[in-house]
Amino acid sequence: MGRIRTCLGCRTRTEPAHLVRIAAQGGAAVVDFERRLPGRGAWVHPTQRCAERATRALPRALRQPHLDTSPIARWADGLDPSPDRRNEHHMDN
């Protein structure tokens, strides 16, 4: 199956192709569409629900306690609220 990532919003494990990467840049969390920004990244489904849930956990996930998450909140406002997770695997640990 290849690499697996966990969505920071819903904790579902899936392939990176189903997720977007979020990274810290200049003290703010930004969507890394190209997946090339340096440093730690967090993975999130491109849905409003997962992005909103992840916003709260981003400072810890990216190890930046004073991270501005408002760019992610604005990005989440324009997303589809319902996720499509047909090809994903949930871990029951």
Image (cartoon, rainbow, N blue to C red):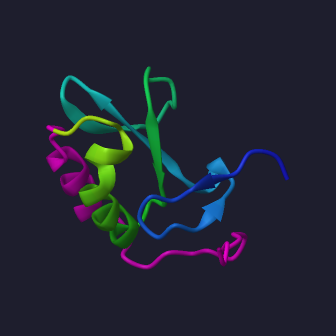
**Can residue 53 be spotted in the picture?**
yes
Where is the C terminus found, in terms of image quarters?
bottom right
- Furthest-right residue in view? 1
Counting the numbered discs, the total is 0
As for residue 87 lying within the magenta part, the answer is yes
Residue at 39 percent of width and 67 percent of height: 50
Magenta stretch, main secondary structure, is loop
Q: How far across and how far down the image is residue 25, in percent?
A: 27, 26
Q: How far across and how far down the image is residue 81, in percent?
A: 36, 76
Residue at 32 percent of width and 67 percent of height: 53
**Which sits in the foreground, 66 or 32?**
66
Q: How far across and how far down the image is residue 13, in percent?
A: 63, 63
Drawn side of residue 29 relative to residue 85, left or right: left
Drawn side of residue 45 relative to residue 81, left or right: right
Q: Relative to 76, does residue 31 appear above or below in the rendering?
A: above
Q: Relative to 39, does residue 91 appear above or below in the rendering?
A: below
- Furthest-front residue in view? 93
**Boundaries of the magenta span:** 66-93
**Can residue 78 be spotted in the picture?**
no
Drawn side of residue 87 relative to residue 36, left or right: right
Q: Within the image, what quadrant is residue 57 found in?
A: bottom left
Residue at 34 percent of width and 59 percent of height: 54
Q: Within the image, what quadrant is residue 46 found in?
A: bottom left
